[in-house]
């Protein structure tokens, strides 16, 4: 009887694991960001983000404070939302 219970428990545990379970993708940020200097651009790129989703806004604004922006986001492979670069 113990073997049958153990067998059923193992079958239940295996069947409850599914590959189609939703796993949050950390390479797609949500919300809106404004980046003002190169350090912020570098930190955003280092986060591993590869895509800007629809309904997501990324603003890059050179405001003269901090280090000037000289290099943008080479990690981005797709822009589905808004990418605005101003005053640069």
Image: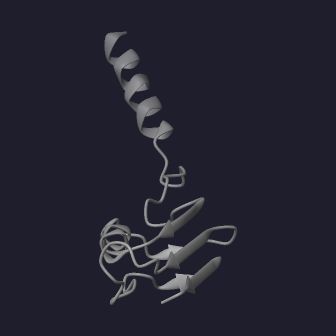
Q: Which residue occupies 34% across, 83% down?
A: 68
Image coordinates of residue 82 in percent, x first then y, are 64, 78
Image coordinates of residue 5 in percent, x first then y, are 40, 16
Image coordinates of residue 39 in percent, x first then y, are 30, 71
Image coordinates of residue 6 in percent, x first then y, are 35, 20
Relative vertical location of residue 16 with respect to residue 58 in this rendering, above or below = above
Q: Which residue occupies 44% across, 66% down?
A: 27
Task: Looking at the picture, tell me which residue is in the foreground, 38 or 4.
Answer: 38
Q: Is residue 17 left or right of residue 83?
A: left
Extreme residue toward the right, this view: 55
Relative vertical location of residue 4 with respect to residue 1 in this rendering, above or below = below
Q: Is residue 16 left or right of residue 31?
A: left
Q: How is the image coloured?
A: one colour
Q: Which residue occupies 53% across, 84% down?
A: 78
Task: Looking at the picture, tell me which residue is in the foreground, 16 or 63.
Answer: 63
Task: Looking at the picture, tell me which residue is in the foreground, 47 or 70.
Answer: 70
Task: Looking at the picture, tell me which residue is in the foreground, 84 or 24.
Answer: 84
């Amino acid at each position: 009887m113990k073997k049958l219970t153990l067998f059923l428990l193992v079958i239940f545990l295996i069947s409850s694991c599914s590959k189609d379970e939703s796993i949050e993708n950390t390479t797609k940020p949500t919300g809106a960001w404004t980046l003002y200097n190169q350090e912020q651009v570098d930190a955003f790129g280092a986060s591993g983000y590869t895509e800007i989703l629809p309904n997501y806004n990324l603003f890059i604004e050179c405001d003269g404070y901090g280090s000037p922006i000289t290099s943008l986001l080479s990690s981005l492979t797709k822009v589905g939302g808004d990418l605005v670069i101003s005053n640069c």
